[in-house]
Image: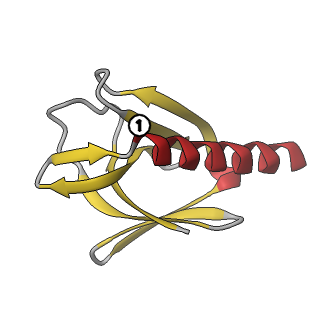
Amino acid sequence: MSYRIFYYHGAELGLATKVAKGVLEIDNKAIAIKSGGNSYHIAFHDVEDVELIRLHKIGRVIRLKHGDGTHFLSVVRFMVGQFALINFLATGRVFNRIQNAVNSKHNQA
């Protein structure tokens, strides 16, 4: 399944942070973030921590800590420039799916 998202690869996310838009695809082994010609693949067994946080009380954001750093992402309804309307419920569903996959991969090890 694929979702329209905004994402940021870095240590912290704030209101002034420049985010990029892309598409998130989830399969049984990993997630893929695709934006333009770039593609980031994060295997579930490489994820150290996944959290659902509230960004300044305006929306849900998923924080993925993995071997290559930290990714922040959120499912959006639409995005114009740096303004995004976050899909609150879809972001929660994506978080649950990622968290369940990460937990099952870590329990297998």
Q: Secondary structure at mark 1?
A: strand
Instruction: Find the residue positioned furthest to the bottom.
Output: 37
Residue 7 seen from this side? yes
Estimate how packed mark 1 is, as few (under 14), some (14 to 19) or many (20 or more) residues with alpha carbons within 10 Å: many
Q: Is residue 109 visible?
A: no
Q: Residue furthest left?
A: 81
Residue 29 lies left or right of residue 92; in this view the side is: right
**Colour logic:** secondary structure
Q: Height in image: 71 above or below 31? A: above
Please, which residue is most extreme toward the right here?
108
Q: Residue at the location (72% across, 45% down)?
A: 100
Q: Which x, y percent locates residue 86?
A: 32, 44
Q: Would you name the residue on which mark 1 appears?
A: 61
Q: Position of residue 34 (x, y in %)?
A: 39, 69
Residue 32, compared with residue 60, is above or below; it is below
Residue 98 percent across, percent down from the top left:
63, 49
Residue sitting at 22 percent across and 47 percent down? Answer: 84
Given residues 7 and 1, the one toward you in this image is 1
- Relative placement, left or right, of 79 versus 6 is left
| 77 versus 2 height, above or below | above
Q: Is residue 89 above or below residue 78?
A: above
Q: Give the residue type that dot 1 points to.
A: Val
Q: Quadrant of residue 28?
A: bottom right
Left or right of residue 93: residue 59:
left
Q: Nearer the viewer, residue 56 or 78?
A: 78
Q: Residue at x 14, y 33 (%)?
A: 16
Q: Quadrant of the N terminus?
A: bottom right
The reply, left or right, for residue 22 in relation to residue 96 is left
